[in-house]
Image: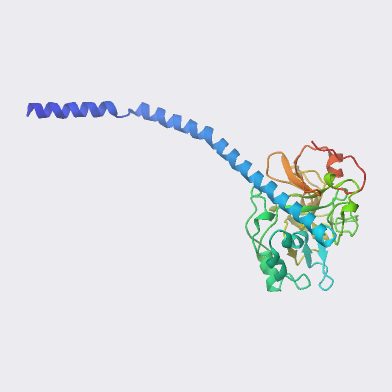
Amino acid sequence: MRNSQRNRESVLARLSHRAFSLVELLVVIGIIGILVALLLPAVQSAREAARRVQCANNLKQMGLAAIHHADALGAFPSGTQISKVMRSDHRLMWTGQLLPFIEQSALRSAIDPDKPWDSYAPNIAAMQTYLSIFRCPSAAAPTAYPQMVEDRVPCTYLACASGTVGIETGAGPLIGDLVQTGAMYTNSRTTHRDFLDGLTNTMLIAESLFLPGVSGPDNDGIGQIIDHWYIGTPGMGPSEMSEAVGSTAIPINSWKRKPQAFIEDIELGFASRHTGLIQAVFADGRVQVISDTISRPIWSAIGTRALGEVAILD
């Protein structure tokens, strides 16, 4: 019995030496917490880097698609295309015009720009179709949002219509006018020879943010939200051009700069959630990172195709 008792005490003693004390346990937990705190920013940074690469790839594909459009059809896509049959607020957007050139020919064949975008089923279905190429993964836009039709998919890229006009309402000139200084605007048919500033110096498409929680009055005093869409629209009146196009007359990431006098100071601006920059594709198919500290004259110049300004980017 004594030997058995001594054996049990010996085992218990060895086990007690192996166990953590409370202080040791707290130290281990603290070390693990520090390691996790150090690791999380690195993981988040790696994820953002991957999202940024995907965004650049989206832009590259859209830029090449626009160039192929110009080669095949004689002109770059128009920012928006007014139907000759429907009311002028029912429009095919530049994104819809690119569909055959991004391996979406079946979707393009299904839609009919000369039929209503809010009642013709194939047109509605197209607006509800999720296409990742038109969405930056960093932008955090919802997968669907009810605007004009249910479950409409937001877009996080805008075509550049102008480098000099930054309003869509008021006295004008307006971004919806049929004459603009940019590459892709209402009913435009710009060709390679129209880019007198050079294809490499003229921006086609850049990032934007879908921000339905940001609202305010336009120059006509009408309340608006920050919303961008793709393929087509049933509601693009003159005050809604920012659904599809933007302008470099507005500073990058203007949504961060408060206060804003009018909502189009944000609506028509290019923006992203990549820290301190946006990405854009130019008319030669080159994707460029652009700092949001870029000088206003250079930023304006890269949004125009033939005004002869100097637009040198790093």
Instruction: Tell me what residue is drawn at x 87 percent, y 43 percent.
Output: 301
Q: Quadrant of residue 197?
A: top right
**Most extreme residue toward the right, as rendered?**
308
Residue 304 vs residue 28, the one in the foreground:
304
Q: Is residue 277 above or below residue 93?
A: above
Q: Is residue 30 above or below residue 215?
A: above
Q: Position of residue 15 (x, y in %)?
A: 24, 29
Residue 154 vs residue 92, the one in the foreground:
92
Q: Position of residue 102 (x, y in %)?
A: 70, 58
Residue 148 in sight in this render? no
Residue 96 vs residue 244, the one in the foreground:
96
User: In the picture, which quadrant includes the N terminus?
Assistant: top left
Q: Quadrant of residue 69?
A: bottom right
Q: Position of residue 115 (x, y in %)?
A: 76, 73
Instruction: Tell me what residue is drawn at x 23 percent, y 26 percent.
Output: 14
Q: Is residue 113 above or below residue 167?
A: below
